[in-house]
Structures are given as C-alpha cells and as structure tokens.
Amino acid sequence: MYYRQKVLVGLLQIIRKPIPKTKLQKMLFLLGQEHRAEYYHFFPHKYGCYSMILDNDIQKLLDKGILRQSEEGLILVDSSDEWVRRLKKRDRAALRALAARFASESTRDVVRYVYLNYPEYTSRSAILTKVLSEEERHAIRQRLLASEQTTSLAVFSIGYEGLDIDQYIARLLANHVAVLVDVRHNPFSMKFDFTKKRLSQALKNVGIAYVHLPELGIPSDKRKPLQSDDDNTYRHRLFREYRETLQDKQEALRRLVSIIEQHTRVALTCFEAKPEQCHRQVLIDYLTEHAQLPGVEVRHL
C-alpha cells in the first residue's frame, strides 16, 4: 500500500464514522494546504478541488475490502487495525488536528470553507450557488478576475516528467488550455495515466480536447539511446535530424497550425520536463522561424 493511501485510511480511523467522498476530498486537500502534509494534488472541478489519484485510491481500497461504501459515506472495515501508528509522527498530529476541526462539520460546511478560503478552486464548480450567497460569489468573481491570466493566442509546452496527472491537469486549467496536442510518436507511458486512452479521457472530463499527431513524434527506437546520452551528443544529433525531417511533414504541421489558430490556447506535450531536452522545442522553434506562428506567445509550463 502506498504511504498516501495509509494517510487516507488513517484519517478514516481517526474519524471513526462514515464520511462522504466529497468531504474526504476536501479534508485531504486541507491536509496539504493547512498542515503541510501534501500527499495528493488537486485541480478545480465540478465540486471544487478534486484529485483523480485520490478518487482512484478510494476505489482500489474499496475493491480490496479495506473500505466499505455505506449510504452515509465511506467506512473503514477493520477499525481495530492501528493504521494511524504506521504513519509519521507529524502526520498523525496533522490528521488529528484536521479531524478535530472538520470531522463534525457537514459536507456543505467543509465545501463552503474551502470555497471561501481557496476561491481559485471554485472556477469550475457546478454547486457554487448552492454553497455561497450572491454577495460571496460576487467577491470571489472579483478576486478571480484580478488574478486571471490573459486568454490571448498562445502555445504552451508541457512535459509530464515529474508530474502526476492531477498536477498536470492543474497546470493546463490554470492557463486556460483548450486543446492538448500529443506529439509523442508512441503515446504509451509507464506512468499509465499518461497513456493515450487514459490521458484523453481525463482531459475530456475537464473539458480539454485531445489530439494525437504521431507524425510529429520521434520513433521509440531512436529515442531509446537518450537514456544513456550523458553529454547530450546523441540528443543534439537526433534533434538536428528531426528538424530536417519537418520539411517533409507539412501536412501534419498545417494541421497543428490550424488547431492553434482555431482554439487559441494549445499545449504540446511529450515526456521531458525541460523543453530543451525534448523535440517539442525543436518543433515550436521551426514553426516560429518559418512564420507559421507569427506573434504567438510561447510558454513552457
């Protein structure tokens, strides 16, 4: 069991009563925000802050029989097992403080607390009118408008190296990305949330379109030597060769430019976190230099 899952189960053991999924999501969000015990990452969704990984962990624990779903919420099946003792001392203290503050509060009250104190997570909420007054909603809108970034034409570059799916989606949403263009030749990953099927579905759930352009990727057999390319000699040669092939991929390039012009906020994705270590930087440079993206802001996330 992952340590983060032990934290989840430890919270349920401390509370010792059913807890709805929505309330559990909010409490573990607050564990990270207010107690510096961040074991899950969150992005704004229909009920405020939401973690796909936490949701998946809950389902796994249900499947294993560690948790049970009742009409009132999630229950720890065997509360006699001392899950809390398996946790770090500081985490035990943080969970107890969290439970003392919010365990007796209703789900609505906990959601309301999160909305008022972390308004950036209300941007996609479907229940805002049920939780906050008109005056409170107006105040939040003003705060969000003051901090909102421009939504002008821009191309973004993002690699999923070092990120989990929740962090990845949070970055896309924060920058109002409308379409993610996957420029991997083979959209498979050992991080299963980033395989084509799972990634496209996750993006669909948050209103971001997914497009795969394998023609703009580099085949796996050519990428494999990068793992042992300590001095970047092979990388430089590979990227030089890749750039030379782009002149023969005009159809895929035209499609990419069309997507950017149509949707205005588009992100290109591959694996590497640093753009200079990924072919997507070569691709963006090529488009910029050949005036196919005149005046377009380019940003790396």
Image (tube, rainbow, N blue to C red):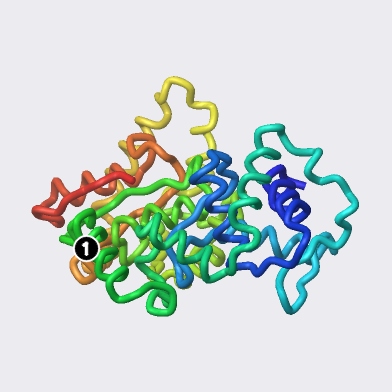
- Quarter of the image where one finds residue 296: bottom left
Asked whether residue 215 appears in the rendered view, the answer is no
Amino acid type for the residue under numbered disc 1: Gln
- Give the side of residue 183 with respect to residue 18, left or right: left
Check the image and report above or below for 50 versus 71: above
Which residue occupies the foreground of this view, 236 or 168? 168
Residue 29: percent from left, percent from top: 53, 53
- Quarter of the image where one finds residue 212: bottom left
Residue depicted at 48% across the width and 61% down the height = 49
Residue carrying label 1: 142
Residue depicted at 40% across the width and 60% down the height = 121
- Give the side of residue 64 with respect to residue 126, left or right: right
Which residue occupies the foreground of this view, 147 or 259? 147
Check the image and report above or below for 228 versus 8: above
Asked whether residue 145 appears in the rendered view, the answer is yes
Which residue occupies the foreground of this view, 272 or 202? 202
